[in-house]
């Protein structure tokens, strides 16, 4: 089983969106038993909260359900437990590299390195914007997760 953690700042917009899409697409492709997905934040701002209602609404329109997910911070055990830790932006990547034990550094990657059209780029934070930002996050996540699943199935 491949264990994958998606990481953003507060774990209420980008990373739970990726988590929900990954769970849905893996199940749809009959791959659910091959993966364990989770999401976390670099900061504990929203611990225990459900994803942002705007993220949930946008995801639900595309058939993804995020309501059962709850925000949590990255903890030290995550670096040992997860095979792949995917940062939503360069700031998260730097933070994860700083916190991660040296011998596990190769587990940390940029999420959009799995995107053919946006490798190495950041998934923009939709929190302070309008609905279009949440749609953009969904577009980027769908593309990258399809590739992530195909490379790791």
Image: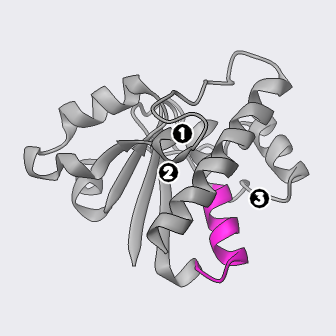
Label whose residue precedes the other's in the sequence (2 or 1): 1
* Residue range (magenta): 20-31
Residue beneath disc 3? 65
- In the rendered image, residue 10, in percent from the top left (x then y), is placed at 51, 32
Residue beneath disc 2? 39
Determine if residue 13 is in view: yes
Mark carried by residue 123: none
Instruction: Give me the C-alpha separation between circle 3 and circle 2.
Output: 14 Å
SS label for mark 3: loop
Please tell me whether residue 78 is drawn above or below residue 10 in the rendered image: below
Q: Is residue 9 left or right of residue 18?
A: left
Instruction: Give me the C-alpha separation between circle 2 and circle 1.
Output: 7 Å
Q: Is residue 108 left or right of residue 45?
A: left
Label whose residue precedes the other's in the sequence (1 or 3): 1
Rate crowding at label 1 as few (under 14), some (14 to 19) or many (20 or more) other CA atoms within 10 Å. many
Looking at the image, which residue is at 57% across and 43% down? 116
Looking at the image, which residue is at 63% across and 66% down? 23
Q: Residue furthest top?
A: 128
């Amino acid at each position: 089983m491949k264990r994958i953690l998606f990481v953003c700042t507060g774990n209420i917009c980008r990373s739970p969106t990726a988590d929900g899409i990954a769970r849905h697409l893996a199940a749809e492709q009959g791959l659910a038993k091959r993966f364990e997905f989770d999401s976390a934040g670099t900061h504990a701002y929203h611990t225990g909260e459900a994803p942002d209602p705007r993220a949930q609404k946008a995801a639900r329109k595309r058939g993804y359900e995020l309501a059962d997910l709850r925000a949590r911070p990255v903890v030290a055990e995550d670096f040992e437990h997860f095979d792949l830790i995917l940062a939503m932006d360069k700031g998260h990547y730097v933070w994860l590299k700083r916190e991660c034990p040296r011998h596990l550094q190769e587990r940390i990657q940029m999420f959009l390195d799995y995107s053919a059209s946006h490798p190495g780029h950041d998934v923009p934070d939709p929190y302070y914007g309008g609905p279009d930002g949440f749609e953009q996050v969904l577009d980027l996540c769908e593309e990258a997760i399809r590739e992530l699943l195909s490379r790791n199935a």
